[in-house]
Amino acid sequence: MMRKTLTLLGVFILTTTLAFAQGFGGEQGFGSGKAYDPVKWSGEVEKISDTEYILHYDAKIQNKWHIYSQFTPEDGPIPMRFKFLPENGTTYELDGKAEESATIREYSDIFGVDEVFWKDTARISQKIILKDNTIKLIKSEVKYQSCIEDGVCINQEFYFVHDLSQEKTISFSNYKAFEDYTAVVNTTEKDTIDEEDSEDDKGLLSIFLIAFISGFAVLLTPCVFPMIPMTVSFFTKQSKDRASGIKNAVIYGISIIVIYTVLGTVISILFGSNFMYELSTGPIFNFIFFVIILVFAISFLGAFEIMLPNSLVNKVDSQANRGGYVGIFFMALALAIVSFSCTFPIAGTALVDAATKGGIAPIISMLGFSLAIALPFTLFAIFPGWLNSLPKSGGWLNSVKVFLGFLELAFAFKFLSNVDLVLDWHFLSREVFIAIWIAIFGSLALYLFGKIKLPHDSDLKHISVGRLLLGLTTLAFTISLIPGLWGAPLQLISGFPPPQHSHSESPFGVGYTNSTTSTTNGDLLPEGASYGPHKIISFKDYETGLAYAKKVNKTAMIDFTGVTCQNCRKMEERVWVEPTILNMLNQDIVLISLYADDPKDLPKSEQYVSDVTGNRVKTYGQKWLEFQQVTYGTNAQPYYVLIDHDGSSLNKPVAYTPDIEEYEAWLKEGITRFNNN
């Protein structure tokens, strides 16, 4: 017993001496200023099923060194030990002891027992069974003893983060790096659900408000406005008492909400977000919608009336004559059909925008739209005296319709611009688009001033003060667009015109000639890169961009974007242009812009069948959209992720962030974390 104690004491003294030598001394190896590490670790995650995974630990051992197994006998060298976080049994459980690759067993004169160890390489595999399917990350530590042939040993620790969602393992030899990384991970895990819910709530709220305002715009059209006093008067006169009149009007309003909300629900059920995204960003859909909106805009301007078949209207109207709740419901359906020519272009635009976001967004959109329409019928039934305060139907209703017609005409060219952007035809350049808008809004200003008269306009002896102010505002807006013809950024309408850097006749301003393909540092443009917004060097391939980031030792920023993404252009034209942010994007970051609507076909060898949708992924856009969904759980653009050279997030990704200070702080946080690791 005394002999073993003295032997262990000797090993301890040698180990302590070696550890002390590592802290003071030369360049490499023993006695160097760097900790000597004879074992290099890596790992991977193997998915067996949705609840079963195997965590693999791979060790590469330096020549003449060996490490001890977890099955080393008692009284021998220190065996390998694993510690898992969160603790085993809470969100998952270990399925038996970790399995080991082939080991060597030799008798030790020093310890008097068999030693079990590895040389050269080792693999340890631990199977786990999830109790909570939502868990994404498991952290672990391994403690072990490395010994060289002369008997000198080092006690060491290594740290691992196992990402189940991406089926990969990140290893750390430095605890601070591991601690910093897990601090980000813990914060991300803790805040992810709340943050995603918060962002979703904000997105749904904005969709609701836009649709609600659109519904109020429809109320002021000749198709709907005259129906308010007529319908309310019908309920109040046909009802036995005021209470029943109010009840019938409320049911009428609820029926309107149900009709439109059912439409949103059907869209949500029939079409997933990916389908609607690809449809809404595709050239065919955008061209069809351009034609439809153009036709409705011309109709609003008074060229012709768009009517649904009389047979359909008559059938619905005949059902409205039935008594009871069924008759009231068909009265609401009749309103929806009769007002189709006024509601479709506005409701359709709001619905398409909502449908691209997927989930319950179409339902929320139609709920907001229908609520705005239904509200006046209910309120005026409750307070019939308010009807006297309503302006009488007349020429002003047609003026409102014409005003909406001009707006629809302008928005129609946004859809045509999307066709040009996706197909990269360049027939509708930024300057041409702006010129069209100047012509449209200039004509609208002249109309409001009474200088242009359209077919259904009544005689206008004078214009009201309100109309004059609206005309002046429209004229000022029109004049503000003119500098855009010579390269001005036009932040007021950022996101609507084609981007300056890719679809402008003068990408860097009138008179600028770019005679070189070098970067701002004088180097040649990196292979696989191109100039993005504000001449930022950008990569359109993830692997190529990440490899370049490693080469120049910079953090990378994944910019999930889209050719037709309006908020992406707003970020580029309003936020990225700020000097401090632009400097960081140029000097401290490698930009990787992945276009989720890129229609170019992948090489045949790179096409694959998606595990998410079951469909074949054929285009670069489909590839990057699925990459974003699988890796980050969202398909919204813009979406920004700062990553290190292993592809791990440095801080929480952000979506559309128009607040310049907030976005700048986010960039600085990620860059600082990268530099400190």
Image (cartoon, rainbow, N blue to C red):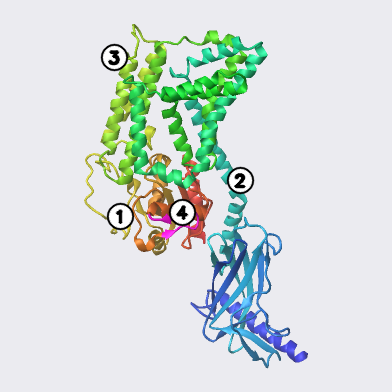
Image mark for residue 194? 2
> Which badge, 3 or 4, is on the more N-terminal residue?
3
> Hey, what amino acid is under mark 3?
Lys
Query: What's the CA distance linking mark 2 and mark 4?
Result: 23 Å
Which is more foreground, mark 2 or mark 1?
Answer: 2
Q: Which residue is mark 1?
A: 519
> Which badge, 2 or 4, is on the more N-terminal residue?
2
> Which badge, 2 or 1, is on the more N-terminal residue?
2
The N terminus lies in which quarter of the figure? Answer: bottom right
Residue at horizontal 55%, vertical 10%? 387
Q: Which residue is mark 3?
A: 451
Residue at horizontal 44%, vertical 51%? 625
Query: What's the CA distance linking mark 1 and mark 4?
Result: 32 Å
Q: Residues within 10 Å of mark 3 (few under 14, many from 20)?
A: few
| Residue lying farthest to the right in this orientation | 1
Image mark for residue 360? none
**Toward which corner of the image does residue 325 lie, by quadrant?**
top right
Q: Which residues are magenta?
A: 608-618
> What secondary structure is the magenta-colored segment mainly?
loop
| Residue lying farthest to the bottom in this orientation | 109
Query: What's the CA distance linking mark 3 and mark 1?
Result: 52 Å
Res 331 visible: no
Which is more foreground, mark 3 or mark 4?
Answer: 4
